[in-house]
Structures are given as C-alpha cells and as structure tokens.
Image (spheres, rainbow, N blue to C red):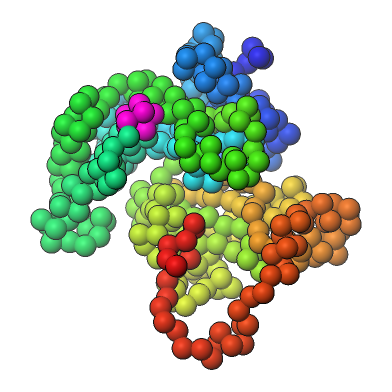
Amino acid sequence: MSEMHVYRFGPNMTDGKADMKNLLGGKGANLAEMALLKIPVPPGCTITTEVCTFYNENNQTYPEELDGQLKKALKDVEDNVGTIFGDSENPLLLSVRSGARTSMPGMMETVLNVGLNDVTREGLIAQSGDPRFVYDAQRRLIQMYSDVVMEKASGIEPEEGMGIRNQLEHELEKMKKQEGVTEDTDLSASNLKDLVEIYKGKVLEVLKKPFPEDPWEQLWGAVSAVFYSWDGKRAKAYRKIENIPEEWGTAVNVQAMVYGNLGEDSATGVAFTRNPATGENNFYGEWLSKAQGEDVVAGIRTPNPLNEICRTEHSGDLPSLEQAVPHLYDELNTIRLNLEDHYSDMMDIEFTIQTGKLWMLQCRIGKRNGPAAIRMASEMVKENRIDGNTAIGRVTPSQLDELLHPIVDPDVEKITSILAKGLPAGPGGAT
C-alpha cells in the first residue's frame, strides 16, 4: 500500500492525472485531468481505492496517516476557495462521492452539503443572503445522511417503505399539504426551517440516535458510508453483471460544494458530447434551473433541453440553455469540444452553474447503445480522431448483437395509436 492516501485536485494543486484510475477511481482521475486542462473544477481531494480495500479488510478502520493527510488536503481546499470547514462565519461545505475504476452509476452512495449544522448555517445565510436556500440544503443533508450513513452504513434494514428516507419524504409531503402547495420549491424559508427540526426529531425517533452536528463527524461518517457501499447488495449485484472484480474498491472524492439552486442564475445539468442513443455528432443533454444534481435524474421535474437539437415532445417550450444563457452554453460547448479532442471519445459530463459561473463536476467515457457505438466509432475514424483498430475495439460483441436484434419499425410506430406515454427511466419505470 502506498504512503500517499489523499490526492488533491484544483487550480495549482493537482496531484493526480487521468491514467491513475486504478488508484484514484474514474471520477477522481478525470477531475484531476480536467484541473490540469484548466477546466473550472471545484477543488477537492480523492481518498484512494487502496484505503477502501484497507477499510474493508481491517474491520472498517483506516490507515493511521489518513486523518492528517485529509486535514492537510482540506486546508489547501480552504485556501483555494477562501472558506473554512466548520467555521461559523465563513463555512466551507463538501460533497462526498464514490468513484470506482469503472463507472457504476447509481450503485454507490453520495452525501451533499456535509459540514452544515445549526451554527454553520448562520454563516452561510450571511454569505448567500438566501435563508430559504440554506434551510433547504440542511434539509437535504439530513435526508441523505440519515439514509446513507445512519441507516444503510449501520446495517439497519427497515421494512419495505419504512426506511428513514421514506419517512422524511412523508414529513415533507405533510408539510406541503398543510401549506396548500404542490412543489417543494413553493415552501417558504420558515417552512423549511421548521422541517429541519421535524426531520431531526424523526431521525432520533426512528434511528434512536441524534443527527450529528459536528462537521468532522459528518465528514468521516460520509466517507465511511461510501466505502461501506462498495460492499452493498446493489453494488455487488452490479459488479457480478458487469464482471467488475471485488478487490478493486472505490475511491472517495471530497469536493467543495457548488450550488445550482442558489437563485435564478444558478442551474445544473448532465450532457453527452454526442447523442448516446443515435451516435449523431450533436451536443446532447438536459438542465434545470435552481436545482441540485440529484433533481435532474430524480424525475421530479421535467428537465429543459440543452439546445434546440435535443428538444423533444416532453420538453415542450421549456427554454434551452442555448436560449437562456448563450454565453454559458458557448463556454460549455467549448469544454465539450476540448474534452472530446483530449480523450478522443464520446464523454458524459455533469455541470453546475452557481450564480452565473460554470463548474464541471465530472467527465467520463459515456455509455452508448449498439447502433450509436458503431456510428461513433466509424465517424471518429473519418474525423481522424482514432484509427481503425481502436474503432473495432470500441464496439463490444453485445453492442453488435444489439444491432442485429429486431426492433419496432419506426414507420409503423408513427401511424400506430399510442396507449400511454412516459419519460424513459432505468431499469424500467413500467412494463
């Protein structure tokens, strides 16, 4: 095991790079690479996959040097962003995310807004000038943390529908009903402040321990929960299907939070540098204003199209990012082209706009279906991005098999009467 357990990334402080996936996981390695390419990435650090292996082999304990190395890396992050973790007046909040060598979407855990408590929230209210946003962030932290750290990572298996997340969702619905509103966004700052207290009471009642107010306890709880989730049922099942070795482990990325829900000029989105369903060379994605990352994929709100090309019947007349903030769309499009040039492949990206500034949260080689894989590989040869052998290696046997399967005739589809409609969802919202 190497002596260095924590690798930093950010302006003028990046220790890793893209070819260190085995040690830093895909997300950590690509965050480091984007930082080296001078792409705007919120600074942070990656705890290596070796620590995950150590944790799971040594009775859920850590190498003794880890604490000092993490504190030192966070000090550099604080200096970089000008805020302090756990500070009452100028608090730094963190996101804690997994990142295995190969992407395992949705299989492992994430905790956002770590470091928020009744003391640091006052500093954040003064900083942001938006109490509603701060109480909402605290509500989200309690909901995520109690589910991921206090329930799942503690090995608690509640009855179906009785998990802490469900119970807190129920309190949120009750509050909306009481206030006569339908959307979370319609709740006021004082509603959300009350909800924070209701949530804390519910956590104590259901899980028999109080929600932790200490920022460092929150951080270590979140880090441990991510490592613990490597051995969770979902992750194990996914690895079996995808033939991912058990011993790889996951890295943990601890990163300064940026907020897509800080006001009208904030947003969040996901995109692909080409269309993953057809393989067409069009920038393809969706975004939501005043939202955090999980809102885009949760299916609660219909997302806006990224540009006019990816507008669908579902997005109707919602404004595209290209229409709403053309200069930020252009900046994102430039990053898209740079990443494709650099990686010579179709990339899957996540971004956040905080009060008019664009931040990149992730990039990875994008998943694609069979027809798209073949189209992309052949077009990238024509564009002189890759050679023929690389193109052949990019199309898997299962993708070729997919291409040969019978499909519904698109012409017949157009003239057949529709029974029902819905937004696509994996692993299948309906049958």
Count of marks, rendered view: 0
Secondary structure of the magenta portion, mostly? helix
Q: Quadrant of residue 265?
A: bottom left
Q: Is residue 327 visible?
A: no
| Residue drawn 49% across the image and 27% down it | 227
Name the residue nearer the viewer: 111 or 234.
234
Q: Position of residue 9 (x, y in %)?
A: 60, 30
Q: Is residue 413 left or right of residue 160?
A: right
What residue lies at 54% left-to-right and 91% top-to-bottom?
Answer: 415
Residue 181 % position (x, y): 17, 61
Please tell me which residue lies in front, 275 or 161: 161
Question: Which of the image's four quarters has the N terminus?
Answer: top right
Vertical placement of 389 versus 281: above or below?
above
For image coordinates 42% across by 49% down, the residue present is: 294
**Residue 413 placement (x, y as % from top left):** 56, 84
Q: Quadrant of residue 296?
A: bottom left
Q: Can the viewer see residue 330?
A: yes
Q: Toward the viewer: 146 or 120? A: 146
The residue lying furthest to the left in this view is 178
